[in-house]
Image (cartoon, rainbow, N blue to C red):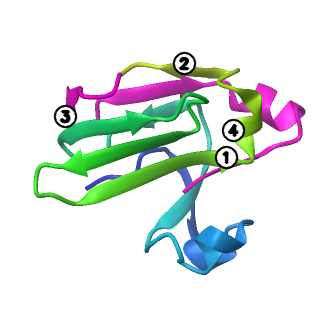
């Protein structure tokens, strides 16, 4: 498994959202991205992409369910600044591009860009 984004890795307990920081949504980590490229962390299948594109569910080939949550409160952007490269049901390979995101615009709009 690889990180879904390049950037600084942040321990889950330091994420700026209580639900993630307390691991109530499961174990994991966060990344403060250095660019807008989000990739598939492991081979599997896309279970869902939220209509707002801020969250992606993947089931790995070995059955692990993974949530990639992009930013905090970014659901409010309704997909603005998010360009999805995949759709629900797609079979994907590790390292394949999932999304291209304009994090500069998201930061300008006042949102946290951590990827959890």
Q: Is residue 57 left or right of residue 8?
A: left
Mark toward the viewer: 4 or 2: 4
On the image, the x and y values in percent for residue 15 come to 67, 68
Q: Are marks 4 and 2 in contact (CB under 8 Å)?
A: no
Q: How many marks?
A: 4
Residue at position x 69%, y 38% from top? 75
Residue 7, compared with residue 90, is above or below; it is below
Residue 91 seen in this snapshot: yes
Q: Is residue 66 left or right of residue 70?
A: left
Residue at position x 40%, y 19% from top? 85
**C-alpha distance separating marks 1 and 3:** 23 Å
Viewport quadrant of the N terminus? bottom left
Q: Is residue 53 left or right of residue 28?
A: right
Label 2 vs 1, first from the N-terminus: 1
**C-alpha distance separating marks 2 and 1:** 14 Å
**C-alpha distance separating marks 4 and 3:** 26 Å
Q: Are marks 4 and 3 in contact (CB under 8 Å)?
A: no
Residue at position x 50%, y 67% from top? 29
* Residue annotated with mark 1: 71
Q: Secondary structure at mark 3?
A: loop
* Residue annotated with mark 3: 93
* Magenta stretch bounds: 87-116
* Residue annotated with mark 4: 75
**Other residues around mark 3 within 10 Å, as few (<14) / some (14–19) / many (≥20):** some
**C-alpha distance separating marks 3 and 2:** 18 Å
On the image, the x and y values in percent for residue 72 come to 71, 50
Q: Please, which residue is most extreme toward the left here? A: 62
Label 3 vs 2, first from the N-terminus: 2
* Residue annotated with mark 2: 83
Viewport quadrant of the C terminus? bottom right
Residue 41 seen in this snapshot: no
On the image, the x and y values in percent for residue 12 come to 57, 73
């Amino acid at each position: 498994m690889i990180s879904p984004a390049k950037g600084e890795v942040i321990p889950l307990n330091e994420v700026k959202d209580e639900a993630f920081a307390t691991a109530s949504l499961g174990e994991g980590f966060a990344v403060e991205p250095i660019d807008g490229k989000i990739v598939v962390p492991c081979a599997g299948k896309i279970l869902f992409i939220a209509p707002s594109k801020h969250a992606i569910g993947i089931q790995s080939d070995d059955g692990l369910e993974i949530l990639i949550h992009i930013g905090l409160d970014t659901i409010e952007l309704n997909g603005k600044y998010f360009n999805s490269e995949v759709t629900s049901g797609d079979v994907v390979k590790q390292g394949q591009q999932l999304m291209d995101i304009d994090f500069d615009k998201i930061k300008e709009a006042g949102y946290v860009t951590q990827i959890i």
